[in-house]
Amino acid sequence: MSREIPYKIYLEESEMPKQWYNLRADMKNKPAPLLNPETLQPVTYEELSGIFCEELAKQELNETDTHIDIPEEIQKFYKMYRPAPLVRAYCLEEKLGTPAKIYYKFEGNNTSGSHKLNSAIAQAYYAKKQGLKGVTTETGAGQWGTALSMACSYFDLDCQVYMVKVSYEQKPFRREVMRTYGASVTPSPSETTNIGRQILKEHPGTNGSLGCAISEAVEKAVSTEGYRYVLGSVLNQVLLHQSIIGMETKIALDKYEIVPDVVIGCAGGGSNLGGLIAPFMGEKIRGERDYQIIAVEPASCPSMTRGTYAYDYCDTGRVCPLQKMYTLGSGFMPSPNHAGGLRYHGMSATLSQLYADGLMEARSVEQSAVFEAATQFARVEGILPAPESSHAIRVALDEALKCKETGEEKTIVFGLTGTGYFDMFAYEKFNDGKMTDYIPTDEEIAASCAKLPKVN
Ligand SMILES: *Cc1c(COP(=O)(O)O)cnc(C)c1O
C-alpha cells in the first residue's frame, strides 16, 4: 500500500532538479535540423549565434547531452516561485463522480501567470552573462512578454516587446504589467521595422499575428548592436528549460509511487507540453514504461491534427530558420479566438517528430467546450484557469468521464499552465452566451499549405 496522498505534493528545496533534461538526446529519430532561410542548408552555430545568445544557440543544437546543469543563479530564482505544486484534484473527482485519479501541475503561481517564466529567466541569464545590453521578443497573449520583462528587470537588461496588435488593444493591463517591469511595448505590426512597414502596406488594418511580431523582433535584434532575439516557445532550448515542469512532476509522483496512465497538456508552440512530458516520454522511448500522452490544440488552429509535416518558416517575414514541423503554413492567420497563446501556425520540431513517430496523440477541441470545462474546474478547484490551460482541462475531464462509464481507475496528470485573470473579455463572451468558434475549412488549410516552401 502506498502512503495516503495529500491534496498538494510539494518538493523540499533539496529535492528540486539541478539539471534540465534534454529529451532529444534520448530520441531515436532526431528532429530534422533547422535550415538557414537563404541557403536552405542546416544552420551552423555561427549563424544561430548572430540571432540568439551564444549559450542558447549551443543548447538549440545540442542533441547529445541528456542532462544540462541549471546554473546556480537560475536555481536561486526558481526557488523564489517553485517548486510548483502538483495538486490531487480530489474535489473535482468527487464532483465528477469518477473513479479516475486526477492530478494537475499548477504553473500559475507567479506574476506572469504562466510557465513562461521558467525559460524567460534562463534566457535573460545567458544574455546577461554574454554582456548584452538587451533583448527583443514578441508576445501574443502577453504571458511571454510579461515573463521576459520580469526576468530582464531581475538581471538589469533592456527588454523590447513586440505585442500582437489585437492583444495590445484587448489586454491593456498586461501591457501595463510589462511596463511596470521596465519593458518597452510596441503594437505589431509597427512602423519601427522594415517588415512591419511592409506588412502594414500589404494588409492595412491587420490585427497582427505571432509570426509577424516575431519577424519584427528578430529584425530589431539583428539591426541593433548589443541585442539578441529571444523566443518563448517552439525552440529546443525552450523545451529544455521547461523540462523543469516534468522533472518536478515526476519526482513528486515517484515520492508516492504514483504512475500516471495518461499525461495531457495544451499545445501552442509546444513548450509546456514538451517540458511536462519530457521524463515520461524519455522512459517510453527507452522502453522502460508506457504512457498515453495527449497534446490538445484549438480547433481554430489545428496544426497537429490537420496540418502538414514539412519544412516551413517559423515567422511571416521568413527571417528565422526553417523548421520541419506540423504546420498550417506560415501565412495562416488563425481566427481571433480567445486562447492567444495557442494561435501559432506550427509546432515544436521535437513534438512534431514524436507525433510523427506515433509516440503521442493529438486532439483538437472547440472554444465553447473549453470554456465549459474552465468554468467547471474554476468552480470546484478554486483556480480561474487560462483559456490555453483549459484546453488540457477539457480533455482531462473527457478522460475522467470515460472512466466513469467504464469503471477504470486511471491516473490522469495534466498541465495547468496558468491563470486567466487577464482573459475576462473571453469569460464575459462565454457567460453572455456569445462565444463563437471559427474552424478553418479544408480548402483554407490546403490553400495555406500550398504556399509551403519547396525544400528537399
Ligand atoms: C504560452 C502559453 C501556452 C502555450 O504555449 P506552449 O509553448 O505551447 O506551452 C499555454 N498556456 C499558457 C498559460 C501560456 O501562457
Image (cartoon, grey):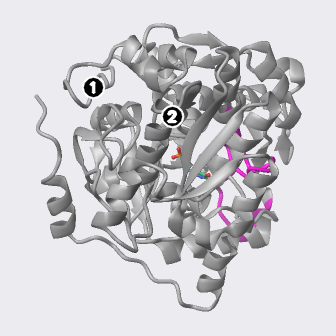
Residue 155 drawn above or below residue 308: above
* Residue type (three-letter) at the residue carrying disc 1: Asn
Badge 1: residue crowd in 10 Å (few <14, some 14–19, many ≥20): some
| Magenta residue check for 103 | yes
Picture quadrant where residue 78 is located: top right
Q: CA distance from mark 1 to mark 2?
A: 17 Å
Residue 45 drawn above or below residue 358: above
Between 11 and 218, the one lying in front of the other is 218
Residue depicted at x 45% and y 83%: 436
User: On the rendered image, what quadrant is the N terminus found in?
Assistant: top right
Mark found first going from the N terminus, 1 or 2: 1
Residue 371 image position (x, y, % from top left) = 59, 73
* Residue type (three-letter) at the residue carrying disc 2: Ala
| Magenta residue check for 102 | yes
Between 277 and 149, the one lying in front of the other is 149
Residue 34 image position (x, y, % from top left) = 31, 25
- Span of residues in magenta: 91-118
Between 80 and 49, the one lying in front of the other is 49
Task: Identify the element where label 2 is drawn.
Answer: helix
Residue 302 can be seen in this image: no
What numbered label is drawn on residue 221?
A: 2
Task: Identify the element where label 1 is drawn.
Answer: loop
User: On the rendered image, what quadrant is the C terminus found in?
Assistant: top left
Residue depicted at x 27% and y 54%: 328
Residue 242 can be seen in this image: yes
Residue 227 image position (x, y, % from top left) = 57, 29
Residue depicted at x 85% and y 22%: 76
Residue 253 drawn above or below residue 337: above
What numbered label is drawn on residue 36?
A: 1
Residue 329 image position (x, y, % from top left) = 25, 52
Picture quadrant where residue 432 is located: bottom right
Residue depicted at x 64% and y 48%: 145
